[in-house]
Amino acid sequence: MTTARAATLPRGALVARAWAGLGDAVAPLSNPAGRPLTRTVKLILDPLVLRPVLHPEFAAGAIAVEHADALVSRIADAGPVLAATASWFAVLKRERRRRWITDGNPQDLYFQRCFELATAHGEPGPDAADVAADVLAEVHGREGPTVAALRDHVTDPANATELTELLASAWAARAPEPVPHTPPATSAFLATCAVAPDRALFDALVAGRAGTAGAAGLDRPGVALAHGLTSRDVPVRPELGRDASKANLPRPFDRSIVQRLFAPLTNAFQRAGLADVPTLVRREIARSAGPWQLAAEESRLVVVLGRDASADLVGPPAGEPGSAAARLRSRWEREAYVHRVLRVPSAAPPEVRADVRGVREAYLRRLWVRLHGRELRHDPVTPDQVWDVLDGVLRSVILDQRDRLRSALEREAVA
């Protein structure tokens, strides 16, 4: 164990060392301690400089000693373009203030665009203000509905009373919970959807309202809680709400109407095709009162398919070889940290054990969010896309867990 530890170095410490060598030129991309901002690492260093997909030796939380100098050199070599990126970011922020733009996080919106400008133009020149104005017009000119407009709409006294009454009416008029019956034959579709999706069977499941039927029991104590979709024993009617933050969004069924629409409205590329704010709010109120709190039967069916396929992640394997369930389990168990927790639970950090034990709940939450976003964009899941959605959600959950594991190991190494 001692030898293994001596053969690696904390990735975060290596990045910080390389970053410190760049000096004040990258201050706009740094925190008060002089280390790269979290978004700098996430949006610039990882995807554009270190590129761990192409260089897997840079991906782990602990870097092998033989690769440490290469990681530091890669950041040092990118120093000029990173310095130019920081300069362009300062230019865009000045132009943003001059235009009284307040919507969206500047780092999320501009970091990667600034890297592109730095790569194409180097340091800002005499025409920098004009270039920045063009970038802002491109980013914000097509932005569609905004969080500010959403908040203003639901808090405006002229609208709030009507919307509150509409919300109460929608929940009072909810259809009776589906009567439990023999579960729909989702297993037949899941058996082959990864390689040869049966379009006719999918359409039959939609026509037979299998997704709605699969919502039976969600209003009973503990059921939606066990699915990870709420922190309450029983889901309750949402509030209209006012504020929201990506850092602490509640579970899907616990979110206010504002919180349900918040994440899509903070993504400049997603919101361009969304409806206007009043329409979004009214549709979301109606959606919140539907089975699975989704509007389309296709979305409800995909939740049921995901629920059934993900059961193998936490229980004894039941899916046939080649089925969606078996493929998800195989992907999950290939992860080294998962294998370790399953083999020797006490050897893993507590947060990693919690991630592994709660993977199915995390999976269903991420699946709901993805389907909700597709409904907002009028992008229903087709039979041919089901496996890509189910598999993509698990990949996304795994990537998040890897990031948390890497952070935990870096904190442990520093300590």
Image: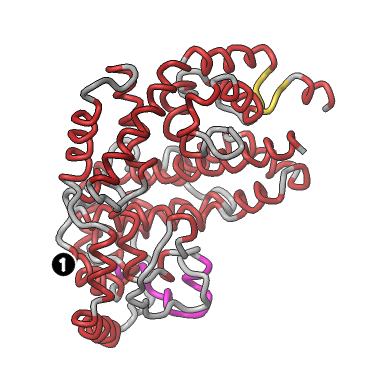
Type of residue at label 1? Thr
Residue at the disc numbered 1: 279
Whether residue 218 appears in magenta in the rendering, the answer is: yes
Residue at image position (28%, 86%) is: 168
Foreground of the two, 34 or 72: 34
Give coordinates of residue 298: x percent, y percent. 24, 58
Residue at image position (25%, 26%) is: 128
Residue 50 lies, with reference to residue 274, above or below; the image says above
Residue 237 lies, with reference to residue 283, above or below; the image says below
Q: Could you tell me which secondary element the residue under label 1 belongs to? A: helix
Determine which quarter of the picture holds residue 68.
top right
Foreground of the two, 351 or 139: 139
Determine which quarter of the picture holds residue 11.
top right
Residue 395 lies, with reference to residue 144, above or below; the image says above
Give coordinates of residue 309: x percent, y percent. 44, 51
Foreground of the two, 306 or 3: 3
Determine which quarter of the picture holds residue 162.
bottom left
Residue at image position (32%, 35%) is: 195
Q: Is residue 239 left or right of residue 407?
A: left
Q: What kind of colouring is applied to the model shown?
A: secondary structure
Give coordinates of residue 187: x percent, y percent. 38, 53
Total marks drawn?
A: 1
State the extent of the magenta-drawn residues as a range: 212-226
Q: Is residue 159 visible?
A: yes
Whether residue 179 appears in magenta in the rendering, the answer is: no
Q: Residue reaching furthest right? A: 2
Foreground of the two, 261 or 289: 261
Q: Is residue 198 visible?
A: no
